[in-house]
Image: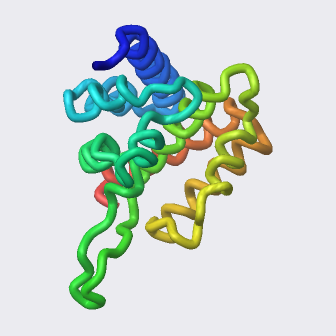
Amino acid sequence: MTDPVNILRHTRTVIHHRRQVRKNCFRAGLYWQGITHDLSKFSPEEFLISCKMYQGNRSPNEAERELYGYSRAWMHHKGRNKHHFEYWTDYNPATRRMAPVKMPLIYVAEMFCDRVAASKTYLGDSYTDSSPLAYYRRGNAAHRIIHPDTAKLLEKLLVMLSEHGEDYTFAYINYILRGRRKQRRSGV
């Protein structure tokens, strides 16, 4: 049985994280993504096991992975949330292997917002604008299945955050998203 305190703590963590992502998305001009971000975390497939695996200093998916060798909650989550690069893989008929697909700009921007929010949520007062970049670089890039263009843009945004701060980076994201919207409206 799941500890009721963990249910409360996990719920508060998810709500805090979503609030941070919403704030970031709004700064970037991604209003719909800000409102709908990570709603699947409240589905039974994700919520129940996440409450059971809650620790407070990292994703419950890590604990589930350690216990079972995989995370059913993560597989459910990444299959429903387009801001995760893991969503963007497909079977390549030429190579007959799974291959990364280039992510649309709006989802790369939401992924950036999510990574900043997650770093703030889990690091608390020890967060700096370099934290999301450090976390990204600690991951095993050689085994990451992400399209090279997507990886390049994400890292560019994380470096920009580290070197120039949030105001500059969110203004840049807003600028490139507005440019993309103008291109679509003009038929380019």
- Relative to 146, does residue 178 appear above or below in the rendering? above
Residue at position x 41%, y 33% in the image: 30
Where, by quadrant of the figure, is residue 35 drawn?
A: top left
- Relative to 122, does residue 156 appear above or below in the rendering? below
Q: Residue furthest bottom?
A: 94
Is the C terminus in the top left, top right, bottom left or bottom right quadrant? bottom left
Residue 187 percent coordinates (x, y): 29, 58
- From the viewer's side, name the closer residue of 161 and 98: 98
Residue 116 percent coordinates (x, y): 59, 35
| Residue 184 in view (yes/no) | yes
- From the viewer's side, name the closer residue of 184 and 49: 49
Residue at position x 48%, y 35% in the image: 59
- From the viewer's side, name the closer residue of 80 and 160: 80
Residue at position x 30%, y 40% in the image: 73
- Relative to 111, does residue 103 appear above or below in the rendering? below
| For residue 2, side relative to residue 12 (left or right) | left
| For residue 102, side relative to residue 176 (left or right) | left
Residue 144 percent coordinates (x, y): 50, 65
Is the N terminus in the top left, top right, bottom left or bottom right quadrant? top left
- Relative to 88, does residue 127 appear above or below in the rendering? above
Residue 92 percent coordinates (x, y): 26, 81
| Residue 106 in view (yes/no) | no
Q: How many marks?
A: 0
| For residue 97, side relative to residue 181 (left or right) | left
Residue at position x 28%, y 33% in the image: 46
Check the image and tell me how it is coloured: rainbow
